[in-house]
Amino acid sequence: MSQHLGELVALITATLWAFSSLFFTRASHQVGSQAVNRVRLLLATIFLSLAHRLLQGTFFPVAIDAQRWGWLTLSAIIGLVLGDGLLFYTYTLIGPRLAMLLMAAVPVISTLVAWVFLGETLQGIEMLAIAITVTGIGWVVMERQPSHDLPQQPRRFATGILCGLGAAAGQAFGLILSKQGMFGGFPALSASLIRVTTAAAIIWLLAIAQRQAGATLSTLRKPDSRNPILVGTIFGPVMGMTLSLVAVQASEVGIASTLMQRTL
């Protein structure tokens, strides 16, 4: 696959994630960020499994070596369980616009990590383009942030900032680990299914241990929460996540993560 294909896919991914952020934020205000995160991972596992059966012939990838499984599992834990969990909590603390501003740090972090661990290097013009793009994202988000949306509680605001930065770091490391796990041309759909299944298993085991599984499933009976989660899942962890893996597989992580950033 050519680099230009990876960049095009990254732009499409950004659009999908922008829509998913809107729907998930709406649902989070209805039932809470943790419930949304659990339900979306459960639904994503089902949808991706059906897609894998249709396109790859099995409901789940088979004959996977331990090394690849390890990279993708670690990617799921850091990127989906920790990173996305913090991002959803950030939505409820400081709102989606400021959360997306903090996520503009993902390309910077991912570029540095890819350089250290994957040996990926960018030319000066590419680094300048990343810097301009990230600056532009931050400018647009802050310019469109209504003053009355800013949190009035300093402690809540500080917690939101820290969670947002943690989410950015988690997503950056998740991308790096995913690319490492897809070495040798491993299908992005299979990698996406492994990551989502792993994350869903961890999240739901924790929910069962905390006796919150029943309450979480009850959100599916409420149209006000079920419908936004359903649409957000299709845009986000099903289509968006799979295409994001295609993007990092086909181009440099720093470039792909820059183009995949989104504004609201």
Image (spheres, rainbow, N blue to C red):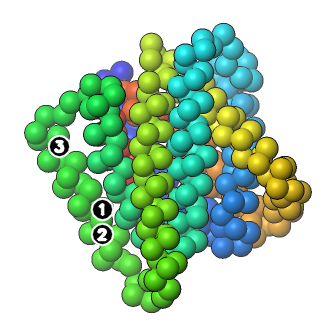
Q: Which residue is mark 1?
A: 137
69 w.r.t. 24: above or below: above
> Cβ–Cβ below 8 Å for labels 2 and 3?
no
Badge 1: few (under 14), some or many (20 or more) residues near its Cα, within 10 Å?
Answer: many
Type of amino acid under label 3? Met
From the viewer's side, name the closer residue of 214 and 155.
155
Comes first in the chain, label 2 or label 3? 3
User: Alpha-carbon distance for marks 3 and 1?
Assistant: 15 Å
From the viewer's side, name the closer residue of 51 and 66.
66
Type of amino acid under label 1? Ile
Query: Which residue ends up furthest to the left in the rendered image?
Result: 124
Image location (x, y in percent) of residue 256: 34, 39
Type of amino acid under label 2? Val
User: Alpha-carbon distance for marks 1 and 2?
Assistant: 5 Å
Q: Who's the residue at 60% across and 11% down the image? A: 65
Question: Is any atom of residue 192 visible in this view?
Answer: no
Image location (x, y in percent) of residue 19: 52, 58
Q: Who's the residue at 36% across and 21% down the image? A: 1
Q: Which residue is mark 3?
A: 127
Q: Which residue is mark 2?
A: 140
User: Alpha-carbon distance for marks 2 and 3?
Assistant: 20 Å
**SS of the residue under disc 1:** helix
Point out the frontmost of discs 3 and 1.
3
Point out the frontmost of discs 2 and 3.
3
16 w.r.t. 67: above or below: below
> Cβ–Cβ below 8 Å for labels 3 and 1?
no
Image location (x, y in percent) of residue 142: 32, 74
> Cβ–Cβ below 8 Å for labels 1 and 2?
yes
- Say which quarter of the image contains residue 57: top right
**SS of the residue under disc 2:** helix
